[in-house]
Image: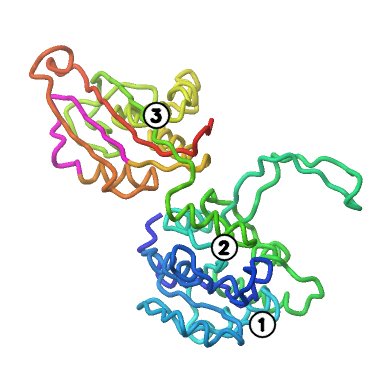
Amino acid sequence: MDLSKKPGIVAIVVAAGRGERAAHPGSDVPKQYRPVGGIPLLARTIQALAAVEAIDQVLPVINRDHVALYQSIGLTHPKLLPPTIGGATRQASCLAGLEALAAEPPEIVLIHDAARPFVDALLVGGVMEALERHDAALPVMAVTDTIKRSADGIRVTNTEDRRTLFAAQTPQAFRYQTILEAHRRAANEVHEFTDDAAIAEWAGMSVGLAEGGAANIKITLPVDFARAERLIAGDVGMETRIGSGYDVHPFGPGNTVHLGGVAIPHEAGLVGHSDADAGLHALTDAIYGAIGEGDIGTHFPSGDPQWRGVDSGVFLGHAAGLVRQRGGRIVNLDLTLVCEAPKIGPHVTAMRARIAELCGIEPGRVAVKATTNERMGFVGRREGIAALAAASVEMPRFAS
């Protein structure tokens, strides 16, 4: 999804709480104004959202008693709107933020907790992709612990099926007019909703799930500040892993070859079970290798007819997704294409952009190079194309 073509996206940052659970001994400063890595938490969150190209404006919703605190942090940004005063509950504060936009309503609104400072473009992009298919969308993380239910806190009543359980995160995305109307209706309900997706569910909307982020933590307790400081400092017990990949496909009938996610006109095609993109296959195997996940055949068997002719971007996106799910990140990818023809140089920029998009990283972290085989071997005889790839990945230490 090209977010730059989706105008009218406003992010509401809910910061009207008193932050008492994260209170620091000897300090009465609400958590959203306490520094994290030398920057007030609220300022860090707003800056992170404003840095997302797709977001047009950012609206803070603050506590009436915190006006002087908000002014003291001296936030300025072309996307930043004047703050709106929130209500007594999170739900009331969200409605106040939505009402503040009514005079010039956006197409889409993101509602985000001020206590989640590590939001990024990848997370926002995933939520927006899910919103294309649903009335609302939110990022989630699969629950990995076994969950017990108890009616009295003393005896287990039953064990939940964790395969159906997900931990909700923000930002949560909605079409503005729809969520505004739902919030207005919900304001008359006795029941208090704990997030905006719950209001959307109550209103009968279809709520889609997007992939959350392990780093998208919510700072709720004092210990969370220490964790956030470690994340900022990079001291999170990470280790660097390296993987390599190799793939080859012969030429066959056709007039287009797929390489690096780009369709290139040619006098022949490439033969393979999928679209035979040797470049993406090599990169996929390099990432799988870095995290100890076998190869493409492990996850997408060539004997399975559902993968016949499929876009190899599916494979690369899956490998990159496994890295994110385990709290890791792709540092860089290096791809070398070996062929006598077609000419690769004119397509390198497009390849880097497509690979970066599939992996959710910046194009500057992707290298694409090409060379010939000096007319030697099957490549030199123009019988096919080979690809070699390397991937550098940072993963939490001891991650499986």
Residue 6, image x and y in percent? Answer: 40, 65
Instruction: Report the label total.
Output: 3
Residue that badge 2 annotates: 172
Mark 3 vs mark 2, foreground winner is 2
In the rendered structure, the answer to whether residue 354 lies left or right of residue 91 reads left
Query: Which amino acid type is marked by label 2?
Result: Gln
What's the residue at 70%, 46% (across, down)?
165
Residue 140, image x and y in percent? Answer: 60, 51
Distance in Å between CA atoms under marks 3 and 2: 35 Å
Q: Quadrant of the C terminus?
A: top right
Q: Using the image, determine if residue 152 lies above or below residue 186.
A: above
The numbered mark, 2 or 1, whose residue comes first in the sequence reads 1
What's the residue at 21%, 19% (across, down)?
384
Query: Which amino acid type is marked by label 3?
Result: Gly
Residue 274 within the segment the image draws in magenta? no
- Residue 382 lies in what quarter of the image? top left
Residue range in magenta is 332-348
Q: Residues within 10 Å of mark 1 (few under 14, many from 20)?
A: some
